[in-house]
Amino acid sequence: MAQETWDKIRSNPKFQAFVQKRNNYSIIMTVLGAIAYYGFILLVAYDKEFLATKIGTGVTTIGIPIGVGVIVFTIILTWIYVSRANTEFDTESEAIVREATK
Amino acid sequence: MNRALKHILGGLTLAALAGVALAAGADLGTTQKQATNWTAITMFAVFVLFTLWITKWAAARTKTAADFYTAGGGITGFQNGLAIAGDYMSAASFLGISGLVFANGFDGLIFSIGWLVGWPIITFLMAERLRNLGKFTFADVASYRFAQTPVRTFAAISTLIVVAFYMIAQMVGAGQLIKILFGLEYIYAEVLVGVIMLMYVLFGGMTATTWVQIIKACMLLAGATFMAGAVLFQFGFSPEALFAKATEVHAKKDAIMGPGALIKDPISAISVGMALMFGTAGLPHILMRFFTVPNAKEARKSVAWATTWIGYFYILTFIIGFGAIVNLIADPVTFYVDGDIAKGLKGGGNMAAVHLANAVGGNLFLGFISAVAFATILAVVAGLTLSGASAVSHDLYASVWRHGNVDSATELRWSKGATMVLGVVAVGLGIAFEKENVAYMVMLAFTIDCSGNFPELFLSVLWKGCTTRGGVVGGSVGLILATVLTIGSASVWEAVLKYPKGSAWFPYNSAALFSMMAAFFTIWLVSKLDNSAQAQKERALYPDQQTRSETGVGAAAASAH
């Protein structure tokens, strides 16, 4: 039954270390995502001139690559997390579950 | 100038000024009925026939309550990612954001970024835990170790409130859009949306709803890619050349390349950002999609794909908005009222993308984009109805009223009954709100979400100390505060309730910052003070819940097909 497995999993010190590690990683990624977004928003609120600065001699402003950059960064951040969670973390988690069920 | 047009222009100016919160809605303004567009109608008819054929196929596979709510858990991560993106890329975001770019340039980009940033939060903190703890609705997760009756009742009520506001915005948007794109009467448009949507949900359940959403997402992405590609092609794939031409012809000149009036004060900006960021993580029709995949791995993949498609789509809408500036201003006779740029676009500012479709792809492509826009509303309404119906049948009926002692067939009957009722209510609300200003409703739905559903869900999963009493009291405080403060803000107090300008007593664009913090604080405080036997039992259950949420041991499995 699940209850017995849960008890065994919890008594495994590897489980606590694993949860700690993955949660720290989630929090770091969340903070990075939040910094990118709120950084951009605060830039818009406090330094509109900077974002409206033209790049070189063209009409394209610094704001365009920064704005598109926030979108691309968000997507990349998500994929980095998912690829690590789906390989490294899942392998560890499955190993812990296997130890508890054998 | 006739009154309808004044209304459109008035609405546009308002949206441009107070942009952040207002343009969020599916507010297409009051539109004028256009000549019947047979190309668009034919394309739409083909879409409907094809999706109904899929519904027939799905119906044969929808036998149990699990099939109805979650397609039996048999959707892959990639498919689910497209479906989630489909739920999120509503007609409002397609037409509204490209319209905002068309009017203000860079501000449209700032706005669209806000809609994307909630997704990483869901990925990093929620997706896997939702999948591991839940079965059919997010209330399964929120009430996992708590007293079922109060938590589920709260979750169901807040789900229905969110669904109602979101639905009204979609239904009114649908009516206005169809009036202008297809030349159909408003009331026929409402009934048509209601009837087709009911067929998807009633017969095909989550399987049909998901596939309709996937097909529509592909059509929307393909159409938008074609349009953005055609625009860039005109300029030899040089964005700089596109921007140069746009600043030359646009009335605001170089100002469209930098931030404008969208963000007035930092508090409003952060508050709106929080509503979008955390509101996304509490939307019932999005959360329910995490139960349609077989395991946590696929749940994570779904959000990564959804984030990718949504981000890509927003980059496209930015290009489309600029393409509209260049193409539409060049031909005022075709696209502007009386051929006069000062009088605005035919059909209002949100029609920029639709007119651009005509400019770059002719009548056939215009028909395609119109059909896609209608299909979009249809699919989003179907998803909303299904999540509302699940809250009624699974949370209120099966769990609260019958304490879980109900067989799958009876629960399925209740789901279908609830779907019928919600369908009729949706059409009724759509008709009742035809002439109303519904721009604030999507934002209100997000604010209620991030202040009610999200804090309760988040703390119940991640904080051991959370108790039933804390969750329900705190969630209710957030929900009520979000509603009251939104009513007091300019977008409702002045624009809807017609109190004089400057009399709004809540000074910011969004209540989220305050209502969400109040909800978190109240949940924390009430839980801390709660030393009842029930609270102690709930805290003792946390380690088991945590073990399941972190490893997936004991999680609901996909049903075999």
Image: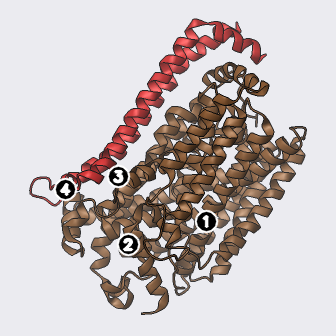
Give the mark nearest the N terminus, 3 or 2.
Answer: 3
Q: Mark 3 lies on which chain?
A: B
Q: Which residue is drawn at 79% across and 37% down?
A: B148
Q: How crowded is mark 2: few (under 14 residues within 10 Å), some or many (20 or more)?
A: many
Q: Quadrant of the N terminus of chain B?
A: bottom left
- Distance in Å between CA atoms under marks 1 and 3: 44 Å
Q: Residues within 10 Å of mark 4 (few under 14, many from 20)?
A: some
Q: Residues within 10 Å of mark 3 (few under 14, many from 20)?
A: some
Q: Position of residue B17 (x, y in %)?
A: 37, 69
**Where does the image place residue A10, in percent across and percent down from the top left?**
65, 11
Instruction: Tell me the subunit letter for badge 4.
Output: A
Vertical side of B555 occupied by B355: above or below:
below
Q: Is residue A24 or residue A79 the one in the foreground? A: A24
Identify the residue position indicated by label 2 in the image. B356
A27 sits to left or right of B138: left
Q: How many marks?
A: 4
Work out whether mark 2 precedes mark 1 in sequence or the reverse, and give the earlier one: 1
Colour assigned to chain B in the rendering is brown
Labels 3 & 4 near each other (Cβ < 8 A):
no
Q: Nearer the viewer, mark 1 or mark 3?
A: 3
Q: Name the residue under label 3.
A: B266
Q: Name the residue under label 1.
A: B47
**Amino acid type at mark 2:** Leu
Which chain's colour is red? Answer: A
Mark identifier at residue A49: 4
